[in-house]
Image (cartoon, helix red, strand yellow):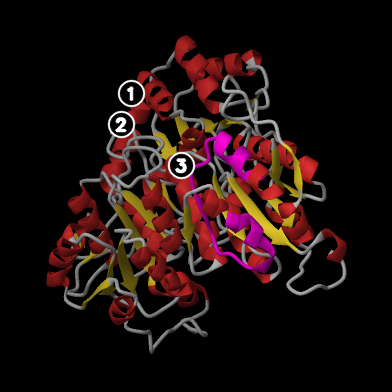
Amino acid sequence: MELNGSQIMIEELKAAGIEMAFGIPGGAIMPFYDELLKADFPHILTRHEQGAAHMADGYARVSGKVAIVVTTSGPGATNLITGLANAQMDSVPLIAITGQVATNMIGTDAFQEADVYGCSIPVTKFNWLIKDVNEIQHVTREAIRVATTGRPGPVLLDFPKDIQITKAEYTPRESTDSPLPAPRQYPELDMEGIEKLLEAIERAERPVIIGGAGIIKSGASAELAKFAKAAGIPVINTLLGLGGFPGTDNLFLGMPGMHGTAYANFALCECDLLINLGARFDDRVTGKVSSFCPNATIAHVDIDDAEIDKRVHTHIPILGNVRDVLITLNERLRPGDYDEWRQTWTDWKENYPLQYDWDGSIKPQYVIDQIQEITDGNGIYVTGVGQHQMWAAQFIRFNEPKTWVTSGGLGTMGFGLPAAIGAKFARPEKDVWLIDGDGSFAMTLVELATAATYNVPVKVAILNNAYLGMVRQWQELFFEKRYSHSHYPENPDFGMIAEGYGVKGINITDVNEVRNSLETAAEHDGPVVLNFLVNKEENVWPMVPAGAGNDEMQLAPPSREAKS
């Protein structure tokens, strides 16, 4: 059959099982949008292109499916860059489709022209500038394959306006075709490396597992739980790995690194075997590399060979899909005797719990505790970036994968609200709670209009301390309390702003109102913004100062009324 370029691309997206698009139309992408409407392809109209990218990101993280984000050329496309960089850092599969000026106008500084191909190279896994309608079928299939196989990531298709309307012969996929292009083959299992790891486990006296986002992306949560419980080895989850191991299990030690639990960092300092399963050795995890796991043999299982030996020397490297490796480990496991080690880390958990003080104000940790209770830990929890993000990671106990959505590697303020909307589209049966800071929320609050338009019942809890909280904390601790441009003394009334968008808004100033307001939000059939005026000087503890080692961790100041 003969179709135009836009129709061909849409047919390929549908054949691949892609079910959702987010974006905003404009001049250079209007032919594609016209065909989206004719094809009845599900599309969410957002209020900003960055918001569209973060919605697609949240959708992909929770659904496990690739999503598409569509924008026009020039500023529409460049507004995607932050969202693409965020997805690239956190290995999230997205397909960005950007309109471009007609091929004969490229390079002439035409209206709304930008070198999107060049701009996006550093922040995508791969990208294409399509100059021939006959390339569209192959390029679209390849884009889907690249985004979703191996280490996932975002890709970009720059789609000139004339190519969108040019016609070509199109052969649909046969019904027997795979719904996705054939994935790249994973490397064969490194049985030699696996055997070395099994021997190390047998010899070890103080082993620790650190599970990263690779556990979730490979669908290996059940295999990790089986492995850890059979071996009796405690588990630490990175920020993006939370939910990969049950947070209520006795073997769980929490999150490591800069704002990790004391007992997780103690375990890293004292272990003699570290088993890294699908986590990159991020600087916020390791602290000063020279003092990271100083007495440990380090094993690292990862799908991306670029991560192995990148920052931390690996004694037992295993390149491969972490789920496949865990299946083999579970078949051949020969655990050691770790009773003494278990007593050690159990004592740490009892003696150094996460805690916060009572002083009559609304403590942000208390709000998060109450959200945990109301949802019984069964919701999807989304954050922006800052202090609130760290408190949520510390105090929420995640018991299943794909229920924690946060910006890890890039640390993108403004990620939370659009990502929460995307997450709710992915799992409409789940309660979705956004825990955000006032600074982070203000950056993309325009997407309240999207939540209102589509009646997306996300529940937003703003922990409003009238500061860029994490900046303020660092200024307090390391800049002698010189609060240089981190204070928002005239923060807007977020409750009133929400009402202006047609969203229920509630301001909470009394700690005794916290529980009732959360219950009201949970019962409301629609989006809600809860603006909690929290303690302005609350800090995140523990903390490893920048450039220090995990052995230099600072614990919370002692308190007479600590609540753990």
Q: CA distance from mark 3 to mark 2?
A: 25 Å
Going by the image, does 373 lie left or right of 206? left
Residue in the image at 49% along x and 43% along y:
19
Secondary structure type for disc 3 = helix
Residue type marked 2: Gln
Give residue 217's position: percent from left, percent from top: 51, 36
Q: CA distance from mark 1 to mark 3?
A: 26 Å
- The span shown in magenta is 9-34
Image: 280 above or below 193: below
Give residue 504's position: percent from left, percent from top: 25, 71
Determine crowd level at label 1: few under 14, some 14-19, many 20+ residues with C-alpha closer than 10 A.
few
Residue type marked 3: Gly
First along the sequence among labels 1 and 3: 3
> Is residue 10 inside the magenta stretch?
yes
Give residue 517's position: percent from left, percent from top: 17, 67
Residue in the image at 33% along x and 29% along y:
342
Going by the image, does 438 lie left or right of 526? right
Mark 2 in CB contact with mark 1 (< 8 angstroms): yes
Determine crowd level at label 2: few under 14, some 14-19, many 20+ residues with C-alpha closer than 10 A.
few
Quadrant assignment, res 292? top right
Give residue 459's position: percent from left, percent from top: 29, 61
Residue in the image at 34% along x and 75% along y:
501
Secondary structure type for disc 1 = helix
Instruction: Please give the residue where the numbered disc 1 appears in the rendered image.
Output: 339
| Quadrant of the drawing holding the C terminus | bottom left
Going by the image, does 11 lie left or right of 117? left
Instruction: Please give the residue where the numbered disc 3 appears in the rendered image.
Output: 241
Instruction: Please give the residue where the numbered disc 2 appears in the rendered image.
Output: 343
Observer-side mark, 3 or 2, equals 3
Residue type marked 1: Asp
